Amino acid sequence: MTALTWIFDGLLTAAMVYLAWSLLSERDLFKAVVLFIAFGLLMALAWVRLRAPDIALAEAAISAGLSGVLLLDAVGAIRSPNPVPEDTSSDSG
Amino acid sequence: MTSNKSPTTEPASTRRPKSSSGAAGVREFAAEIGFARVAFNLLVVLLLGLLFWTVLDLPPQSAGLHAKVKAHMHVSGVASPITAVLLNFRGYDTLLEIVVLLLASIGCLILRDAPQSHPALAPGRPGKWVLDGMIHVLIPVMLLTAGYLLWAGDHAPGGAFQAGAVLAAAGFLLVLGNRMRFWRTPEWLLRLSLSFGMIVFVLVASVVTILTKNLLQYPENYAGILILLIEISVAGSIGCVLITLFAGHPPVTRTPAADQLWHSNDEPKE
């Protein structure tokens, strides 16, 4: 392991801890979901660094992508008084 | 409310040095923020400590089952050890996962309200042009990616779950762009597409179990083709299940007037 990878791993870990903290303490649900998506992407990178590309793929697709969309949908449904599936998604998209 | 927890723990830790030291200070502190919260935080810290201890206790280089998997790769029918474990050596885990996904989509269909009528499903909205352009460019690429991931699962990272997720993402785009209307899906097609992966998996599983007298043990010569068959059907079903989680709802009550309204703004405006 070279110094560069050490620096990269350190930055990655620090960014993930910071993101995790800020998404949990974020009061605005929409911002929290966006932070969660960013966290998922960094998590995928972390799996790559742990030499688990299969899990990285699943993490990027499911955690960052699909969960993010579902959470945004849920936030939209909470915000709008009379939720209609497509209407709520237009808030996020 | 998880978002409430963190902000309260933060001021607590910054407030601690300000109060008087010793047991009296701790008691004062506990009374201030409530006993339950302190107990909860203590529990969290305890669990965290346990977690750290477990991590430190791990052997430095865990061999795991790597050698065993490697030794049996020739009977698995695929070249990627991950796929071999997921669909051959521990096939029943994957089978149960498919069932869980199916149940999740059924729960989603039960819990959602049906929209009152379909015109409500077709609102013209700003940003539509961007979405349309993205759909034209991205959908073919996404389908290609899904196919590649499915094919790559045999010898490289990839497989049914990843391919299904990409398919679902393509479906999300279509739903958002109003190109895929969930309520128009015939009920039998919905039922079939959601459960197709599980049906194929269970069929294959029962046939090979009867033939080889062992639960989910594929005959060596047919393992590759059987796994491919399962992966293709499961990937399709996973895509459908995930789209249902996003856009699914019970059947819409159709009225002639609503139908007419729908058809009047049916075609996407260019």
Image (cartoon, coloured by chain):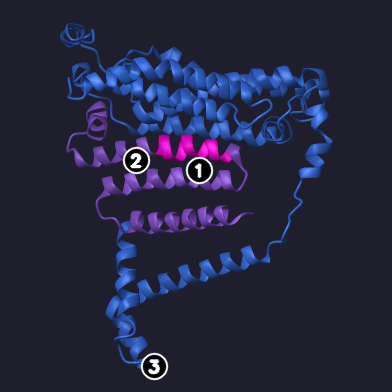
Chain colours: A purple, B blue
Report the chain holding disc 3.
B
Image vertical order of residue B36 relative to residue B22, above or below:
above
The residue at the point 36 percent across, 36 percent down is A70
Q: Magenta: predominant secondary structure element? A: helix
Q: Nearer the viewer, residue B144 or B24?
A: B144
Res. B114 in view = yes
Q: Where is mark 1, residue-wise?
A: A44
- Badges 2 and 3, same chain: no
Q: Where is mark 3, residue-wise?
A: B22
Residue B177 lies left or right of residue A38; in this view the side is: left
Q: Secondary structure under badge 1?
A: helix
Marks 1/3: CA distance?
45 Å
Is disc 2 in contact with disc 3, using a CB cutoff of under 8 Å? no
Magenta stretch, residue numbers: A55-67
Q: Is residue B181 magenta?
A: no
Q: Amino acid at mark 3?
A: Gly
